[in-house]
Image: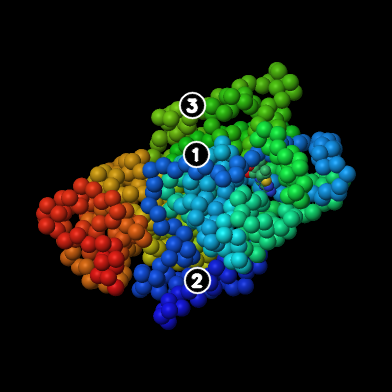
Amino acid sequence: MSNVHKQIEHLRSEIRKHDYLYYVLNAPQITDRQYDKLFAELKELEKQHPELITPDSPTQRVSEKPIEGFAVVRHTTPMLSIDNTYSADELRAFDQRVRKGIGSSHYSFVVELKIDGLAISLRYESGRLVQGATRGDGETGDDVTNNVRTIKSIPLLLCDNPPDVLEVRGEVYMPKKAFAELNEQRQQQDLPLFANPRNAAAGSLKLLDANITATRKLAFFAYELGEASNEISSSHFETLQKLKTFGLPVNPHSARAEDIDEVIKICGQWEKKRYDLEYQIDGMVIKIDRPAQREILGYTGRSPKWCISYKFAAEQARTKVLSIDVQVGKSGILTPVANLEPVLLAGTTVKRASLHNFDEIQRLDVRVGDTVIIEKAGEIIPQVVEVETKQRDLSGSRPFEPPEHCPVCGSRPQKDPSGVYIRCVNPDCPAQLKERLRYFAGRDQMDIENLGSALIEQLVDGGLVKNFADLYKLTAGQLAKLERMGIKSATNVIKGIAESKTRPVSRLIAALGIRHVGIQNAEILAEHFGSLEKLMQSSLEELQSIEQIGPVMAQSIYEYFRNEKNVKVIKALIDAGLKTTERKKLDSDRLAGKTFVLTGTLPNYARSEVEKMIKANGGKAASSVSKNTDFVIAGAEAGSKLEKAQQLGIKIISESEFLKMIK
Ligand code: IVH
């Protein structure tokens, strides 16, 4: 093994070790920064030596291009469901059934958290992750291997001598924090919100583009075995500990219980403590510990008789609707929000609840003064689930009417084409402007320090700021005259605004608030066009041709830059000296002046990655073969492009020949 090879293997095993410490043992030994450094070092070495890249390298979690659809996987042993119970009495009845089934011998239980995500089966062969599949109907599921590979807590390679074949079942879930962040992002992009972390996890895992799954911060806990080439232990509890030594994340709160009273006690404790966890659980799972006893008990229909779930009741609270506000979002969507009599629910005091849209208000018939039942969607976002109409004071109450005017600018709102939303379409509505400015200055966009909501409010109301570009014309003198603002804080704000001029162009694109374009898409656009000016001039066809940009987004971007007002503001931003180009550092200019076309499936790299390498070395990647093409890189099942290249006598090369060209 060469020195470089050894160094690469060393870095990989270090990274795997730290992944294990972080994701499985929850006990990191190095800082994120140190970890990122190891990762960057490995990436650099692999870049210099692409022939040494292996699929189980920590850098290769995402390498696939979007797929057309999921293949079907037949589970080697069926993935069963569990019967539910809702009370201590029902748990005792379960215990009675078990006792009858097993007879006089002693049995113990394992009590686990019921993670609210979706069930997945992972197949490892010789320690390597070879397949990930959803539960589906229990017999067959979807092959989601590409997607599960992107989940950092799922090891690509097991350690400590695992069986040759090991199928692990467990739950893919989205931690509460990641769920809240994802929904916040989606709200800013006018995308429909996920109702709870489980839907968000399922939606993220079933994406055809694993690149997007990789951004979704999913996690995993292993809790059962499927097929295994040899028995791991004669106790489930010990099997779980063993899975942990193989490098798999196992929930740390699983506990053995010797009798049903202990089980009930543990369930009760978690019912209260569940809000302290970083992920959502919807109950507990109670299992018989010994596999031999499980076998005696057997199955009924699709669920085992050795396992039962105890489902928590969704926590609810009763309160009163004090008033209903209509809020105006950055794209003008009017959202009704109920102001509530403050009430404690699932660990926090709730004062407001979203009513989503006006159809929802009508469906529930929520009225001011009503007594309502609220619940937290995914334990996080409070929402009204029921109105106690019997409690209604008949004399005064009237159905809530959708507003005929924007509550802020007074203009007439319009129904969205989807028919669900009502939108204020006045581009000068100060409420929208405020929201857009807040977004523009936000942490993930231009990150303007000290430009908070209250100041934006003053700036817009005082007529000092009418668009993004006006921010860059402000002076400390002007700001110092505002209420609650001294010269020192005024200077700080101006400094923050000035500093934002050098943000990467991707952030500026995101900050414009083009409908459907969030930071990830903004990065794709910045990468593709290299400058804001080029993006502005792009044709609709070019936007549509970008792999990750869908037709709706392409249309929205195109229209945004056809709006004269928008263009005027952007020109003023450019005049103010904001950075609008992404100066790409080239790896080399070895491919300068050469045009490449890719066809077929390449053995190691996704097409988009090879295109990146071409560009990074000064070359051009084109989509169709012509006499201007210098090279065609052909992989398996190459089609008409290959034929055309042969006809035109263009040089055809393989992926490895290409890699040699840039080495
Ligand atoms: S055991 C035959 N253990 O709950 C038993 N399931 O409602 C197979 N779940 O489909 C599952 N946490 O998706 C088991 N600790 C846990 C679990 C768990 C969550 C999910 C799983 C299952 C569903 C049944």
Horizontal relation, residue 433 to residue 225: left or right: left
Q: Residues within 10 Å of mark 2 (few under 14, many from 20)?
A: some
Instruction: Name the secondary structure under disc 2.
Output: helix
Give the number of callouts.
Answer: 3
Residue 490 x %, y %: 50, 63
The residue pinned by badge 1 equals 192
Instruction: Name the secondary structure under disc 3.
Output: loop
Up-down relation of residue 563 to residue 14 (above or below): above
Q: Residues within 10 Å of mark 1 (few under 14, many from 20)?
A: few
Residue 423 x %, y %: 45, 34
Q: Amino acid at mark 2?
A: Arg
If you read the primary sequence from the N terminus, does the residue marked by circle 2 or circle 1 appear first? 2
- Give the quarter the ligand 1 occupies: top right
Of residues 513 and 134, the one drawn nearer to the viewer in this rendering: 134
The residue pinned by badge 2 equals 12
Residue 149 x %, y %: 50, 56
Alpha carbon of mark 3 to alpha carbon of mark 1: how far? 24 Å
Of residues 288 and 49, the one drawn nearer to the viewer in this rendering: 288
Q: Quadrant of residue 399?
A: top right
Q: Residues within 10 Å of mark 3 (few under 14, many from 20)?
A: few
Residue 160 visible in the shown view: yes
Instruction: Name the secondary structure under disc 1.
Output: loop
